Amino acid sequence: MGDVVGGTEILGKRVLREVERQMSGHEHVRFCLRGRRRHCLVALDERLLIVRPRFNAVTATVFDYDDVTAIELRTSAFTGGIDVWSPGERRPSRITVSKRRAGDYDHALAQLRERIGHAQRRLALAADTPPLIASLERIAQLRRSGALSEDEYGRLKEVLMTNADRGMSASEAPSTLSAPEEREAWST
């Protein structure tokens, strides 16, 4: 039986293709956890993927770390599972694991819980952040995720900084984006 914790080398070809499709250009794979039926949990820099190959397709569930409320390793009489809980979900997203190999996941799950805790603390601090800083952090995050191009990011940053110098809030600032671009930038 192969490794259940490692890098992308433990992923099957179809799963690896889906992980690469889901990643933005700046993201890196931190580690991968492989369960039964080639289901995988992939820890990226700022997001978590659960990838499940099916007969004719591969599905991926994506979580931002600050949206995860808990990660649990559960075992029953014969099997186990890694459950990922998020707000609004009645059931967790799960990858099934071998009960005999459950201990192999402990160190990686501890790292994952640490990343989730860090993201949640950062989110709590952001609530106390002045509006200009929060706006700058938000557009930087949108740029990193690929939702904003470098040009769009530069224009938005310039508008935010100019308006801060004038004492205007971001909501009062005139936009340099088209209406659809602006709706997308602030709704995500």
Image: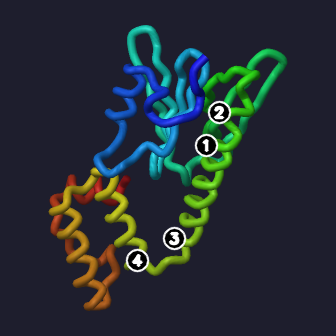
Q: How many marks?
A: 4
The amino acid pointed to by label 2 is: Pro
The amino acid pointed to by label 1 is Ser
Which residue does the image show at 35% across and 41% down from the upper left? 23
Mark 2: give few (<14), some (14-19) or many (20+) Cα within 10 Å.
some
The residue tagged 2 is 92
**In this view, 3 is above or below 88:** above
Residue 90 in view (yes/no): no
Residue at the limit of the structure toward the top, as seen here? 55
Q: Nearer the viewer, residue 187 or 140?
A: 140
The image position of residue 81, as x and y in percent, is 69, 27
Distance from label 3 to label 4 (Cα)? 9 Å
Q: Position of residue 165 (x, y in %)?
A: 27, 90
Quadrant housing residue 70: top right
Report which quarter residue 104 is drawn in. top right
- Residue identifier under label 3: 126
* Mark 1 surroundings within 10 Å by alpha-carbon count, few (fewer than 14), some (14 through 19), many (20 or more): some
Three-letter code, disc 4: Ile
Q: Are marks 1 and 2 in contact (CB under 8 Å)?
A: yes
Of the image marks 2 and 4, the number of the one nearer the N terminus? 2
